[in-house]
Amino acid sequence: DQQVKQNSPSLSVQEGRISILNCDYTNSMFDYFLWYKKYPAEGPTFLISISSIKDKNEDGRFTVFLNKSAKHLSLHIVPSQPGDSAVYFCAASVDFNKFYFGSGTKLNVKP
Amino acid sequence: KAGVTQTPRYLIKTRGQQVTLSCSPISGHRSVSWYQQTPGQGLQFLFEYFSETQRNKGNFPGRFSGRQFSNSRSEMNVSTLELGDSALYLCASGGLAGAGANVLTFGAGSRLTVL
């Protein structure tokens, strides 16, 4: 039962352009969402979060958008840098402690 | 502030054996969660402990078990290993980070290979 889905396994973007990573969820009870970045041989690193009472949250080059009616979440990275190349996971939670993760999107930023 | 420490980082076992993985959370964090990562499957939730009690459990067979000690350190055990148990096992410490966001902070993981 995949409650959080990332339908694009990979994404390739030119350096300096915008990267848009998408995430869909099925459980309308989810009220807290996070994005993580993962490099090989390392654990996931927290990037940015958003609560369901908001529709947008920004942190530097990273912006997360939440569309509750569509049950859709997206992460925008502007401008994209080669160091952003990693696997990105979105996650959703109802109670902060049991998080459902997507299968990840591998982002490749080309110099 | 030390991060989440997982040991061992890598291990190889054979089918039928058992394995114990250890996790030390961030100091002061009382919640520890375990996830299994396999290629193409993302992170699958195993269980979560808070103050030595299992508070949430994922959809894994009973061969997967865990516990948490009074110092918040946690262990997970997998018995009667199967080839499909080969994965990266990630431990996450639950608590506040950055601008007050309640997040999971992950360790580097334990890479288990079952032969």
Image: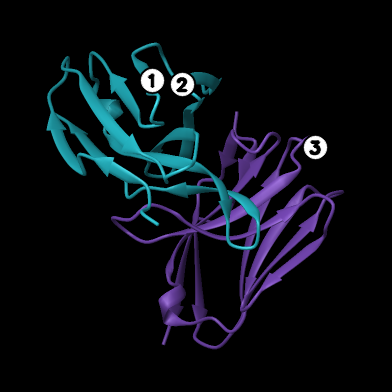
Q: Which chain is rendered cyan in the image?
A: B
Q: Which mark is residue B52?
A: 2
Residues at circles 1 and 3 in contact by the CB criterion of under 8 Å: no
Quadrant for the N terminus of chain A in the image: top right
Q: Is residue A43 above or below residue A58?
A: above
- Image location (x, y in percent) of residue A104: 50, 52
Q: Is residue B15 left or right of residue B31?
A: left
Residues at circles 1 and 2 in contact by the CB criterion of under 8 Å: yes
Residue at image x 78%, y 47%? A71
- Image location (x, y in percent) of residue B86: 26, 33
Q: Amino acid at mark 3?
A: Ser
- Which structural element holds mark 1? strand
User: Which of the 4 quarters of the picture holds residue A66?
Assistant: bottom right
- Image location (x, y in percent) of residue A101: 55, 43
Q: CA distance from mark 3 to mark 2?
A: 30 Å
Residue at image x 50%, y 18%? B53
Q: Which mark is residue A28?
A: 3
Q: Is residue A102 above or below residue B57?
A: below
Q: Nearer the viewer, residue A77 or A58?
A: A58
- What residue is pinned by disc 1? B67
Q: Residues within 10 Å of mark 1 (few under 14, many from 20)?
A: some
Residue at image x 29%, y 21%? B77
- Which structural element holds mark 3? loop
Tag in front: 1 or 2? 2
Q: Which chain is rendered purple in the image?
A: A
